[in-house]
């Protein structure tokens, strides 16, 4: 199972997701450019020693990522989706793509993917914190594939 962050821009969230990836044995992809330096003290404070326990793959840009993983199924997580994550059948090698905290993914990427999912929320709210969304969706994907240990 793969977690893919598209140009993340909040160091604490990325660090929390790296810790989650280490704990759940997920492969972690970061599509550059990040909105921060991976040596940022806020990032280091949250990631602690989990960075070394995670498999982190960095991609120069989205085109490089797509070229390398075009045969994998990429599933976009977005508040704009109609389908709910818990009604979707995840596969073991899915690439779970999460957009930037500040702006999601560009419209051209939305058009590129047929599989788009969201977490149901109160209609009065805009979005969950990305680290929480990753935890919710990754846990369900792992559960469906009997990968929780």
Image (tube, rainbow, N blue to C red):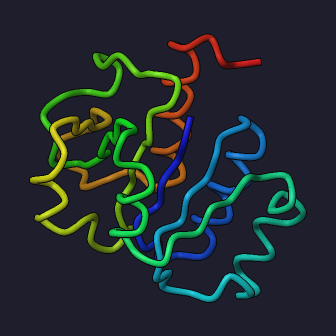
**Nearest the camera: 9 or 128?**
9
Q: Position of residue 100 (x, y in %)?
A: 37, 68
Q: Residue at x 64, y 46 (%)?
A: 27
**Nearest the camera: 87 or 70?**
70
Q: Residue at x 67, y 65 (%)?
A: 15
- Quadrant into which the N terminus falls: top right
Classify residue 146 as left or right of residue 105.
right
Residue 105, compared with residue 71, is above or below; it is below
Residue 97, compared with residue 6, is above or below; it is above
Q: Which picture quadrant has residue 37?
A: bottom right
Q: Tell me, yes or no, if residue 148 can be seen here.
A: yes
Q: Residue at x 90, y 62 (%)?
A: 49
Residue at the extreme right of the image, as rendered: 49
**Nearest the camera: 71 or 39?**
71
Q: Position of residue 25 (x, y in %)?
A: 73, 37
Q: Position of residue 70 (x, y in %)?
A: 34, 48
């Amino acid at each position: 199972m793969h977690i893919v962050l598209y140009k993340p821009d909040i160091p604490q969230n990325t660090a929390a997701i790296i810790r989650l990836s280490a704990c759940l044995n997920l492969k972690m992809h970061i599509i550059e450019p990040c909105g921060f330096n991976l040596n940022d003290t806020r990032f280091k404070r949250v990631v602690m020693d989990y960075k070394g326990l995670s498999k982190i793959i960095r991609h120069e840009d989205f085109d490089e990522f797509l070229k390398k993983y075009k045969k994998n199924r990429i599933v976009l997580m977005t508040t704009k989706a109609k389908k709910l994550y818990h009604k979707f059948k995840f596969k073991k090698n899915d690439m779970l793509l999460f957009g930037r905290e500040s702006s999601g993914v560009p419209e051209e990427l939305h058009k590129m993917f047929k599989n788009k999912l969201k977490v149901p929320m109160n209609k009065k709210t805009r979005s969950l914190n990305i680290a929480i969304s990753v935890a919710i969706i990754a846990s369900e994907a792992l559960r469906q594939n009997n990968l929780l240990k």
